[in-house]
Amino acid sequence: MMDLLAFARGPGLKYAMFVFVFGILWRLIGVLLLAAKVDRSEPRHTASWKGLRLIVLRLWPRREFLQRTAAIQILGYAFHIGFLVVLVFYLPHVLFFEDVFKGLLGTNLHGLLGVSWPYLPGGVIMMAGTVTVAALVALLVHRLVSPVKRLLSNFDDYFSWLATTAPLVTGMMAYSHVGPPYQTMLAMHILSVELLLLWFPFGKLMHAFTIVISRAVTGMEFERKGAAL
Amino acid sequence: MTPAETEPEHPLELDAPRLSVKQPEVRLDRQGEMEDTERVERALRHFIRDFGRTAALYLESCVHCGQCAEACHYYVATGDPKYTPIWKVEPFKQAYKREYGPFALLFRLLGLKPKLTVERLQQWQELIYDACTLCGRCSLICPAGIDIANLVSLARHGMSSAGLVPHELWAVAERAERQGSPLGATPKVFQERIEWLTDEYEIEIPLDKPRAQVICTLSSIEIMKYPKSIVAMAKVMNHLGLDWTFRSDGYEATNFGMLSGNVRWQKDMSLKLIQAAIACGAQTMVLPECGHAYGAVRWQGANVYGKPLPFRVLHISEFLAENVDNGRLKLKRLAKSATYHDPCQISRRGGATAAARTVLAALGVELREMTPAADMNWCCGGGGGVVTIHRADPLRYKVFQIKMEQIESTQAEVPVTACSNCRQTFDDGQAHFHWDKTMHSLLELAADNLEESPR
């Protein structure tokens, strides 16, 4: 079983990172290199960059929509924030990132900024993980029962859900020593992370990058017209 | 011969509360003779040709959250998930990923997206045309910042190239291209209408002045159905003592080329107006009470023309507001309560939300806003060419009920709008539901209450 772990930690991670980075670049560049249309209409507001505020505005629905969408918004935030907390503040993850930093920059965060990467106690991480998985399950159920979302959904939606949830579940199982031996569980965890990295550039997970650009473009276009943001 | 009789194939329905061609006995929702494969190929080519970086970015950003459904009057009124705004472009979204996106090869190899078929496009015709007024409410809810209404417009480009436009909308657009007006208001009819109004209302209406500072334009709906609106425009212009004119070589501001998705016709229609304005050396073009005309000329005109327009373009509500603000236009106070129906393309999508309210304030009415109002207003359900499509009537009446409830709950005496297309949609809805509320025109309200003070 050590072999699996060694593969996951070594070449597996390397290849997954490669696909992750180049896949993202390929998809972003493929879109951003397309010709942009020049708008020759006389702008109502010349400072169209002010439309960039849409990036922030669209973090939360307008009052008029809130009643119909608030519950789903909250669940969405719960799993996004929870996922980030687990990813960024769990000590073994911190050590891993510090290692990567060191490899890339020759120094860790402390050497660079004089502050250490903060981390949270394992118990807190487990709580965040539980909330995250619960929110993800709730959202999956909603996707399956809401006629609108069921209609819109395809392979991407379900597979992206799996790729997001698997690292959380395997990680929490490894932490609490549930299921297979720790070494195996750890290998499963790292492999599931690699699945996430491999899938990331191809499906909807890419919204992590595209959403900001899309909001920015729309915001500037609408601001130019003085239209509602 | 009345204009309605000039067209045996698609006679007009000029006595109806809303204007369209007569309800076709046999629907011809396909135009032109071509193989199915060619239709699909054309739909794809034109959809793809017309979108640049922004549209591609939009299609890459959707996470299928489904929130746009909650913003759409069609979904809210029916609860049918097929009316979810982003679903209306689903065949094109899939085709983009399969044929054009950065991973197109992968999608094709793995067969993840089905090949586009003509049956699928025909199935979507209802969603792209009958069930979208391009009102853009969904574009305000999308967490990914996708301008969904814009994507539906692009899908219409593809559908039009494939000859898959609903019968009446196509017939109306084709007539507009051929005769210069979607409703038979040919230049000759227009000239006669102006002569008649000049006599009937004893008002000077300049037509075809070789030079003028301001060129005024109209919607066929006004020429054929609300001629008082033309008089109102003339009254205001004369009152302000402006050097202005209508031009018989460029008067029709509606753009059914745009609404049907025919890019070439859209260009022809816009160029007529632009060239007429340039011919008379106008510094300002005033657009009529018509929502989509504003989108077509104010925001797309220069892009169709290929360079900035050498004149300003103002919607009539903006024109009135500007003259209220600079003190040239004084209005009598109207001791009534009113509510304002925002035309989507003027307010939400056009940025002129404040203009009408400035005019209403000058009229001194007690403005009772709807909930929601202004940028978040519900569409009347008749925009985007929908009001011409008979097949869409039952659905249109459903979404119109949202509007009726909104207006009823303000308990305002006078509902006002600044779009003739909204107005005829209201007239039609009023007749259908035997409703006691009649929609009024902001321009006519202003023209009826000019303060006759020496300038």
Image: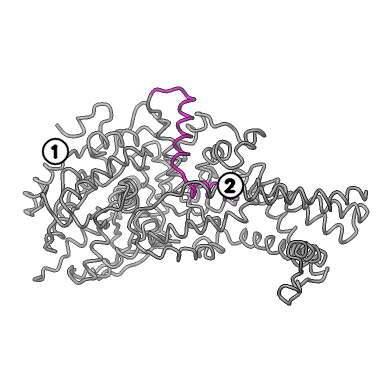
Location of residue A82 by image quarter: bottom right
Residue B19 left/right relative to A85? left
Residue found at the far front of this picture? A106
Tell me if residue A146 comes above or below residue B120 in the rendering: below
> What label sits on residue B292 in the rendered view?
none
Query: Three-letter amino acid code at disc 2?
Result: Val
Q: Position of residue B154 (x, y in %)?
A: 44, 42
Magenta stretch: residue B37 in it?
yes
Query: Three-letter amino acid code at disc 1?
Result: Lys
Residue under circle 1? Answer: B188
Query: Distance of mark 2 from mark 1, alpha carbons?
Result: 50 Å
Magenta stretch: residue A167 in it?
no
Give the residue at x 27% y 53%: B309
**Count of numbered marks:** 2
The magenta span reads B33-62
Mark 2 element type? helix
